[in-house]
Amino acid sequence: MISRRKFLVRWAGAFLALVWGMVLRPFSKGWADTDPFSGTEFVGKTRAGEHESFYINYWKPMRRIQPAKWKLEVGGLCENPGTFTLKDILSFPAKTRNSRMKCVECWSARALWQGFSIAELEKVVQPRPSAIGVVFHCADAYIEYLSRESLLKPETLLVYNMNGKPLTDEHGFPLRIIVPFKYGYKNPKAILKMEYVSEFQAGTWSKIGAYSMDGTILPGTDHPLDFGKQPRRIPGGEILEY
Ligand SMILES: Nc1nc2c(c(=O)[nH]1)N[C@H]1C(S)=C(S)[C@@H](COP(=O)(O)O)O[C@H]1N2
Ligand SMILES: [Mo]
């Protein structure tokens, strides 16, 4: 019940943003602000999320994002940089994929993710040939880099729904990326900006932890939360076995 209510509240927010943009904004010049956050409530690292088989990880406590004010900014090395509202995002052809997210700190969990391919976004923004990757800037000041090669793989999606419902703030509302063959730290949440760049950049987590900058899942042992943390061997790459 709660999630249904949240769902309605969120998309009602997006609708209000549209009305605001079309009808009210022209009459309120100078008043509109671009801060996508609301209030003083913070989202942080927790082990008690709404999707019980997931832990929640945020680098820094993050103020909740207000759907009506959020826009995805896409810029850097592209011919046609722009901003996208929630409504714009939802109008891309939807794709759904069931995949496991594997955190480098032992745990993993599986979910059904819905979103769209980066190729659809690129049709609009038209990255320059010199753009080899994207730096993602997130609402908690987290930064992560992904090569365009990884971004354009069919298993990679920009995601707004998790298990059939809009992402919760905890899991990265309104938009995150799922790259199932890379560790969780290469799956940035609560994305504010995508910047097309010509050079690799180290992400937040690979700078603070002793983990690879590339983030491809290595062979080893996994402790899936949805299987009671029972250890399982993994061969490396996306976990397809369970
Ligand atoms: N913005 C942001 N995205 C992030 C992180 C973060 O700290 N900030 N942590 C990453 C890490 S280390 C993991 S394991 C996953 C966890 O995803 P979840 O919180 O939805 O379970 O988010 C990734 N995306
Ligand atoms: Mo992680």
Image (spheres, grey):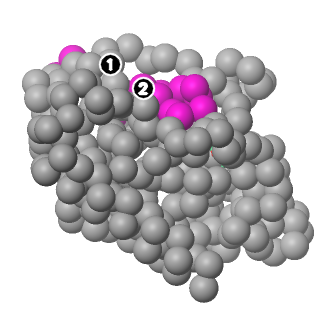
**Is residue 163 visible to us here?**
no
Indicate yes or no whether the magenta region holds residue 144.
Answer: yes
Q: Is residue 145 visible?
A: yes
User: Residue 96: x and y, percent?
Assistant: 38, 71
Q: Quadrant of the C terminus?
A: bottom right
Q: Image quarter for residue 50? A: bottom right
Q: Amino acid at mark 2?
A: Val
For the residues bearing labels 2 and 1, Cβ distance under 8 angstroms: yes
Q: Position of residue 35 (x, y in %)?
A: 43, 31
- Side of 165 relative to 219 (left or right): left
* Quarter location, residue 134: top left
- The boundaries of the magenta stretch are 129-148
Which residue is disc 2 drawn over? 135
Mark 1 burial class by Cα count in 10 Å: few <14, some 14-19, many 20+: many
- In the drawing, does residue 149 fall left or right of residue 200? left
Kind of residue at badge 1: Val
SS state under label 2: strand
Q: Which mark is residue 197?
A: 1
Mark 2 and mark 1 lie on one chain; the one further toward the N terminus is: 2
Name the foreground residue: 22 vs 44: 22
Left or right: 102 as drawn, with respect to 149: right
* Dot 2 crowding, Cα within 10 Å, few <14, some 14–19, many 20+: many
Name the residue located 33 percent from the left edge and 39 percent from the top edge: 72
- Checking the image for residue 54, the label placed there is none
Secondary structure under the numbered disc 1 in the rendered image:
strand
Q: Residue at point 60% right, 85% down? A: 1
Which residue corresponds to the image point at 55% horizontal and 50% vertical from the top-left?
A: 172
